[in-house]
Image: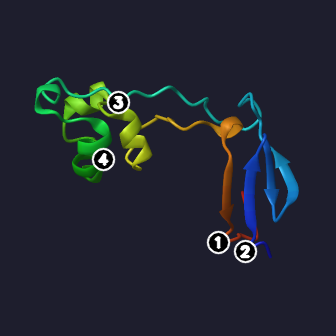
């Protein structure tokens, strides 16, 4: 089993325990994933004069409230603090503000393995 083994993504290649197991599709054509978008950290108009920003205020007070999704239409429409919300796990529906697989350098560990995938 691969549980507990290191997973590394580097240079468009995926390794498990140091063994090359797959390549990353840099064109997003074979993996059916959408290309990530460039996200912003635009703030609501009243925040500027209050000294609030996305990196500090929103990360602490807004992200835990799911970035007001479904509660405040202005946040849903304008996607205020879009990058901060995504980074905090409260990204807006359809947003992928990540660096994308081709630019990802990652080291992690396998926690669980399913015997059958897609079946």
Q: Secondary structure at mark 3?
A: loop
| Looking at the image, residue 97 lies above or below residue 114 | above
Q: Is residue 74 left or right of residue 34?
A: left
Camera-nearest label, 4 or 1: 4
Camera-nearest label, 4 or 2: 4
* Res. 70 in view: yes
Q: CA distance from mark 3 to mark 2?
A: 38 Å
Res 70 label: none
Which is more N-terminal, label 1 or label 2?
2
Q: Secondary structure at mark 4?
A: helix
Residue labelled with disc 2: 3
Which is more N-terminal, label 2 or label 3?
2
Q: Is residue 110 left or right of residue 80?
A: right
Res 59 label: 4
Residue labelled with disc 1: 111
Camera-nearest label, 3 or 1: 3
Which is more N-terminal, label 2 or label 4?
2
Decide: marks 2, 1 in contact (CB < 8 A)? yes
Decide: marks 3, 2 in contact (CB < 8 A)? no
Residue 24's spot in the image, x, y percent? 77, 41
Q: Nearer the viewer, residue 114 or 11?
A: 11
Residue 70's spot in the image, x, y percent? 25, 41
Q: Residues within 10 Å of mark 1 (few under 14, many from 20)?
A: few
């Amino acid at each position: 089993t691969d549980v507990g083994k290191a997973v590394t993504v580097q240079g468009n290649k995926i390794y498990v325990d140091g063994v090359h197991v797959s390549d990353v599709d840099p064109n997003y054509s074979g993996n059916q994933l959408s290309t990530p978008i460039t996200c912003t950290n635009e703030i609501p108009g009243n925040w500027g004069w209050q000294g609030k920003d996305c990196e500090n205020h929103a990360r602490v007070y807004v992200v835990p409230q799911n970035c007001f999704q479904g509660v405040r239409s202005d946040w849903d429409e304008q996607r205020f603090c879009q990058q901060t919300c995504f980074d905090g796990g409260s990204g807006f529906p359809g947003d992928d503000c990540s660096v994308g697989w081709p630019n990802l350098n990652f080291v992690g560990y396998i926690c669980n393995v399913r015997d059958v995938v897609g079946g």
